[in-house]
Structures are given as C-alpha cells and as structure tokens.
Image: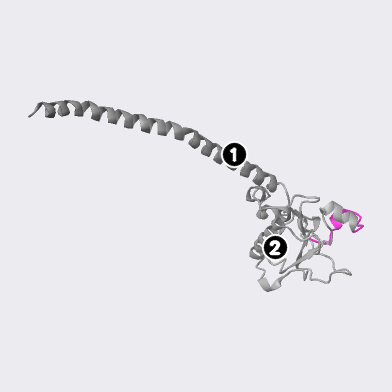
C-alpha cells in the first residue's frame, strides 16, 4: 500500500461521518420546517368541523322546509306509541279507517284551531290527532284531542261525512303555500303505521288529502 492509499483510507472515515451528520441535520431541518404546515392543516380541519357543527345545530332549530333535516331534533319528539295512548280503553275493532286532512292554516295547535273554527272549547275539535308544523306547536308534535282520549267518534258535518269508525288526523298546513314539513310527513307515516298495526287497518282504508 502506498502512502497515497493510506492517506485516502484515513480520510475516508471522517468524510463519511461528516456526510452522515449533514444528512441528519438536513432531515431534522426539513422535519422542523414541516411542523408549521402540519399545525396549519390541523387547525384548518378543526375550524371546519366546528363551523359545520354550529351550522347543523342552527339548522336543527328551524323547520325542515327551511333547512336540512335534523335527526337529533326529530328524535327528541315523543314516541308515537305514547301519542296514541288514551284515558279510555281501546277496543281492537273500534276503528277501521284513517283519514288525513289539512287544517288550511299556516300554523296552530288544538286550542288555536278550536278558536279559528269558533268552537266553544278545544274538546269540540272534530278530529283525533293533530300534527303541528312548528308554528303553534313543536314541528312534528302529535297532539291527541279529547275525542281520542275518550275514544269518541268524529261527528259528520258539512265538511265531512265519514264513518264513526274513522280516525281523523289533522295535518297543520294550508296545502298550498304552507306545505307539510319533513318532520310532519315522517310523523304522519309513523302514526298511520302504528294505528294500522294496532287496529288492523288495511292500506286501502287510509285516505290522504288530494292536495
């Protein structure tokens, strides 16, 4: 081995170590330079999620017709099974038909509609259930009338000639400008299904409004 070979051999190791050191410094600097970017991305993601949650909560407090359907708000409504309970005993063959009709108002509850119809008292409402639209009662709220509580039949009048075995459901809406909300539609479907199962009412005996 010549002196030149020995010199090159002795110089190789420190040069390799120096290159490794510089590589480590390079990757360290690169990692540190990436940290601010990671922090920014995480911060942006957190802000987006928070903003989305706030928007969903805000929409949940409005009628579905004015915004997105909120499952969390809908689930807070009373169960349909609870809504069809009554003080008087229910006979399995008492009811064999269901009729749904619009209130032809933009809002209201049992008391308000009784006043609009100029009834002497809310107990005189000629239906068994009323489904509110958020104006006068909670959106999708099912109110049972005194007729249902006492298991009394609706009375035929100038606007209705149904059977004494017909369950009448009033959907708060005028059927034109104030259409039923998503909450009302879902609750109506659940109410009709529950009543149909309980009293063995066939689909052909369920009547919906033409409008």
Judge by depth and name the residue closer to the eye, 157 or 104: 104
Residue 42 picture location, percent across and down: 52, 38
- For disc 2, the marked residue is 91
As drawn, 51 above or below 173: above
Most extreme residue toward the bottom is: 204
Residue 57 figure quarter: top right
Q: Residue at x 75, y 49 (%)?
A: 138
Is residue 42 shown left or right of residue 132?
Answer: left
Residue 51 picture location, percent across and down: 63, 42
1 or 2: tag closer to the N-terminus: 1
Is residue 163 shown left or right of residue 39?
Answer: right
Q: Residue at x 73, y 49 (%)?
A: 62
As drawn, 21 above or below 177: above
* First to last magenta residue range: 117-127
| Quadrant placement of the C terminus | bottom right
Judge by depth and name the residue closer to the eye, 106 or 153: 106
Residue 210 picture location, percent across and down: 77, 71
Examine the rendering and report whether any part of residue 153 can be seen. Answer: no
Residue 20 magenta = no
Residue 1: image tag: none
- For disc 1, the marked residue is 47
Secondary structure of the residue carrying numbered label 1: helix
Is residue 189 shown left or right of residue 169?
Answer: left
Examine the rendering and report whether any part of residue 10 can be seen. Answer: yes
Secondary structure of the residue carrying numbered label 2: loop
Total residue callouts:
2
Residue 206 figure quarter: bottom right
Residue 120 magenta = yes
Is residue 82 shown left or right of residue 161?
Answer: left
Q: CA distance from mark 1 to mark 2?
A: 57 Å
Residue 96 picture location, percent across and down: 71, 69
| Classed neighbour count for the residue bearing mark 2: other residues with Cα under 10 Å, few (<14), some (14–19), many (≥20) | few
């Amino acid at each position: 081995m010549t002196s030149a070979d020995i010199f090159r051999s002795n110089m190789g190791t420190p040069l390799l170590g120096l290159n490794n050191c510089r590589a480590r410094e390079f990757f360290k600097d690169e990692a540190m330079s990436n940290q601010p970017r990671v922090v920014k991305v995480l911060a942006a993601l957190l802000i987006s999620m928070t903003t989305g949650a706030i928007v969903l909560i805000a929409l949940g407090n409005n009628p579905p017709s004015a915004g997105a359907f909120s499952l969390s708000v809908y689930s807070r409504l009373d169960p349909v099974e609870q809504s069809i309970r009554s003080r008087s005993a229910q006979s399995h063959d008492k009811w064999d038909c269901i009729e749904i009709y619009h209130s032809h108002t933009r809002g209201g509850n049992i008391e308000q509609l009784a006043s609009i119809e100029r009834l002497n008292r809310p107990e005189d409402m000629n239906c068994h259930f009323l489904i509110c639209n958020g104006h006068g009662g909670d959106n999708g709220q099912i109110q049972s009338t005194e007729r249902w509580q006492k298991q009394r039949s609706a009375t035929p009048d100038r606007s209705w000639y149904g059977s004494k075995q017909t369950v009448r459901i009033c959907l708060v809406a005028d059927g034109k400008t104030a259409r039923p909300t998503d909450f009302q539609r879902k609750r109506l479907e659940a109410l009709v299904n529950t009543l149909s199962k309980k009293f063995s009412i066939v689909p052909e005996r369920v009547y919906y409004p033409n409008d």
